[in-house]
Image: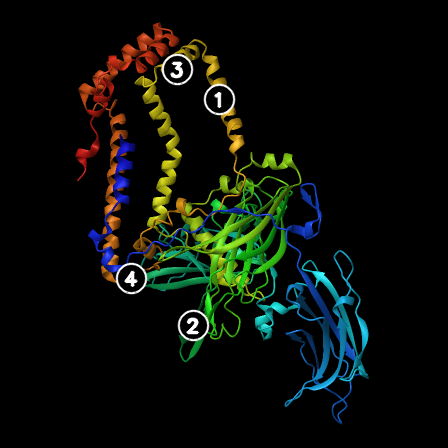
Amino acid sequence: MVTRRFSSSFNALLSLNYASSGAEELIPVMQRAPPEDFLLKETKPHLGGGKVSGDKLTSTYDLVEQMQYLYVRVSKAKDLPAKDLTGSCDPYVEVRLGNYKGTTRHFEKKTNPEWNQVFAFSKDRIQASTLEVTVKDKDVVKDDFIGRVWFDLNEIPKRVPPDSPLAPQWYRLEDKNGNKAKGELMLAVWMGTQADEAFPEAWHSDAATVSGADALANIRSKVYLSPKLWYLRVNLIEAQDLQPSDKGRYPEVFVKAILGNQALRTRISQSRTINPMWNEDLMFVAAEPFEEPLILSVEDRVAPNKEEVLGRCMIPLQMVDRRFDHKPVNTRWVNLEKHVVIMEGDKKKEIKFASRLHVRICLEGGYHVLDESTHYSSDLRPTAKQLWKSSIGVLELGILNAQGLMPMKTKDGRGTTDSYCVAKYGQKWVRTRTIIDSFAPRWNEQYTWEVFDPCTVITIGVFDNCHLHGGDKGGGARDSRIGKVRIRLSTLETDRVYTHSYPLLVLYPNGVKKMGEIHLAVRFTCSSLLNMMHMYSQPLLPKMHYIHPLTVSQLDSLRHQATQIVSMRLSRAEPPLRKEIVEYMLDVGSHMWSMRRSKANFFRIMGVLSGLIAVGKWFDQICNWKNPITTVLIHILFIILVMYPELILPTIFLYLFLIGVWYYRWRPRHPPHMDTRLSHADSAHPDELDEEFDTFPTTKPSDIVRMRYDRLRSIAGRIQTVVGDLATQGERLQSLLSWRDPRATALFVIFCLVAAIVLYVTPFQVVALLAGIYVLRHPRFRHKLPSVPLNFFRRLPARTDCML
């Protein structure tokens, strides 16, 4: 009854008429977009150049499509001619291939310069048959020609790793007429692929329109590592010999602890003396290398908004003990410094008090510092490396390409997108190079990670680079999100290459939108099947999370601090992995209130309970003899199980085994992906989405806030009613033996006595058989009125009549 009432209440809630609350007048109704393809698509790309042996690929770069590049390494020059009487020149090198041109940096007054720069030209865009490498002299008016070297593209050698790098050679410069000129240039020219070690740092012809050292650094592929995070536990025990300024009052003493931008404080000590006690734990997040000390400040609250510092100390984290298990570390006394200046006549005298603070401080190495949600965490290892277990396999990811990307910004009056990918698993972040001005970028980059737990998730995000062409002037530019994909490793078969095109879905205030598709190749290789199976019997988190668990509020606060530290450290890298990227990948803000998520979670619960509901309906059909043959068979099965109860558990497990084997034929063959229907993103009301994207605290007008508050009150009222019904049923159970209703309790006690005697003298099998036959009796022997036990239960008293 309660479940039925709860379901009907929430269904009525879902059908709230927004027009009645004024939502339609405040927010325009979202026009339903035409149906879009939000499904996962399996693809068959030409991976590894087609070098396949059975089901396994045998190339070094075997999860991406090979991309051919012409590489030009400009090493150095010598004996260049001088341009004036000073005997020097300002040389630089220009590499030209068709319409593409790349230049090195120039040196001032140097005839033997060293550049050591690499240029990469995509073979797909080559529109010339010769390569021209020209040495020029930088000049204010017009750069002077020094000499050049020609290469026929048909004569350029090919190189494929793991071959050693091609050794550069000296080439004599030629003048414009093809005659020998003064000076020599050391070059290496070869045809290679993206697997070449020169690829990441090379200048690419795709980025020919990007200028400036900072902009070029922002488009290169990089690998980042998250800082090593520790939980810092500060146990504040007591203080001694405090010296408050006002001796005539009881001090209200507390301790404030500060680590970087984290500040926590204890409660006010109940022992209001100069020797207060707390014995309270404060938890912080610290990152290696430890740059900031822990500051402890003992303060006295002398007024509601005024505190007096009674002593302060600074503790470097390098001096703090590290704990790897549950054994407590030793306590210690730290001296509190407080300098007071007093006047003695015309002279100032400084007095230093010797107060002390008793603490126990340690860095917790047995915990895993959560910077991601536990639902899709990519790493579950403890902080201390000594507690790590051996890896169980390797995860390989090939980021192939994207299709149908939406224009993210405007340049020269037209839409454009400069896209790159970021993948995060464990402590390793990878960032692909930025493909300039393309709605169908091809990255074809491959990365690997060690896997320590199969029940983890890798996250891949696609972003638009807004820090090119002077887009970051003023520092206000933010890279736009194009979409995100999550892949859970436990859903992948080992040693199988998954090649799929994933939809990139982003939720906006006006609804969900498909921003394009990203093409990925994923392979999870298991090094030890036994170790991987053993992981399923181990706790998900390190054992310290269960021996000394942290509270939910502590975990939320610590996760927020961890994400802030990670985003700050990665934003200081070169090129930076910016804060908005890190926060989007770590799902910062996913805990905020959302009507859409609430609906989705409710229907997820209903989906889980749908199996039980279906079994209940099926059993009701059996009891009502809807199908007499099935009911008779159930009677026979029931009698057999009652007569031979030792067959009950084997029958249940055999039935589950057969169901699992039967469903193996329809097992999922594709990884899971973002589901708009499950998320209720395709049916969310625009006002719900507008509320979800609102800031905290809100910035909306008062009439919208009032409407949303009234709607939330309506929802809370329905939930309150359901919770009250659940409490009523529980209180009725408690009242059976409480003698609150003396007649009901007397009847129940007498029934229990009679039942005990009957069950004692009657074999259990007979009782079970009679009860089962009674439940399964024919509808001819039923009546529509409620049963006697249900009538008795509903008449039991509850505490609802005591509520105000």
Residue with the mark numbered 4 = 700
Q: Position of residue 5 (x, y in %)?
A: 26, 34
Do tag 1 and tag 2 residues touch (Cβ < 8 Å)? no
Within 10 angstroms of label 2, few (less than 14), some, or many (20 or more) residues? few
Residue found at x 20% / y 20%: 785
Residue found at x 65% / y 74%: 102
Q: Is residue 69 visible?
A: yes
| Left or right for 435, reference 698 | right
Residue with the mark numbered 1 = 655
Q: Is residue 766 above or below residue 357?
A: above
SS at badge 3: helix
Do tag 2 and tag 3 residues touch (Cβ < 8 Å)? no
The CA span between labels 3 and 4 is 61 Å
SS at badge 4: loop
SS at badge 2: strand
Residue with the mark numbered 3 = 634
Q: Quadrant of residue 432?
A: bottom right
Q: Position of residue 731 (x, y in %)?
A: 25, 29
SS at badge 1: helix
Q: Earlier in the sequence, mark 4 or mark 2?
A: 2
Q: Position of residue 274 (x, y in %)?
A: 39, 56
Task: Tell me which amino acid carries mark 3.
Answer: Ile
Task: Tell me which amino acid carries mark 2.
Answer: Val
Do tag 1 and tag 4 residues touch (Cβ < 8 Å)? no
Q: Quadrant of the N terminus?
A: top left
Q: Earlier in the sequence, mark 1 or mark 4?
A: 1
- Camera-near label (1 vs 2) is 1
Residue with the mark numbered 2 = 341
